[in-house]
Amino acid sequence: MTEPKPSARDLDLSAAHWLPGTGDTGEVEKIEIAYVGEYILMRNSTEPDRHILVFTHAEWDAFTAGAKNGEFDVSPPS
């Protein structure tokens, strides 16, 4: 049986090097990612200590593939 995935609070983030997302939109709020051990973390740059998401490599691959395929696109309100 595999161990449950840790939350960000369970990981040592002291050496995390946060990388900004690609594509300069000119907005202040950006997504940042960091590689910590075997996990990939994602956070909002304007609230760096809140709501850090933790992904395994398989979860990250599925998430990025879904984003590339438009699974998370939001249609403007009609």
Image (spheres, rainbow, N blue to C red):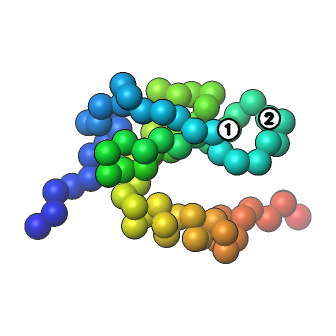
Give the residue number, with chain letter if any, for mark 1: 30
Residue at horizontal 65%, vertical 45%? 21
Q: How far apart are labels 2 and 1 at the CA level?
A: 7 Å
| Callout 2–callout 1 Cβ contact below 8 Å | yes
Is residue 50 visible in the rendered image? The answer is no
Identity, as a three-letter code, of the amino acid under mark 1? Lys
Residue 18 rendering spot, x and y as whole percentages: 52, 35
Name the residue nearer the viewer: 78 or 39.
Answer: 39
In terms of image quadrants, where is residue 12? Answer: top left
Looking at the image, which residue sits at the far bottom? 69
Question: In this rendering, would 8 be left or right of 29?
Answer: left
Identity, as a three-letter code, of the amino acid under mark 2? Glu
Above/below status of 8 relative to 75: above
In terms of image quadrants, where is residue 68? Answer: bottom right
SS of the residue at dot 2? loop
Above/below status of 55 relative to 45: below
Residue at horizontal 79%, vertical 35%? 27
Residue 40 rendering spot, x and y as whole percentages: 43, 49
Residue at horizontal 57%, vertical 64%? 64
Q: Quadrant of the N terminus?
A: bottom left
Give the residue number, with chain letter if any, for mark 2: 27
Question: In this rendering, would 33 be left or right of 12?
Answer: right
Is residue 46 visible in the rendered image? The answer is yes
SS of the residue at dot 1? loop
Residue 77 rendering spot, x and y as whole percentages: 84, 60
Residue 54 rendering spot, x and y as whole percentages: 40, 48
Question: In this rendering, would 65 be left or right of 10?
Answer: right
Q: Residues within 10 Å of mark 1 (few under 14, many from 20)?
A: some
Q: How many marks?
A: 2
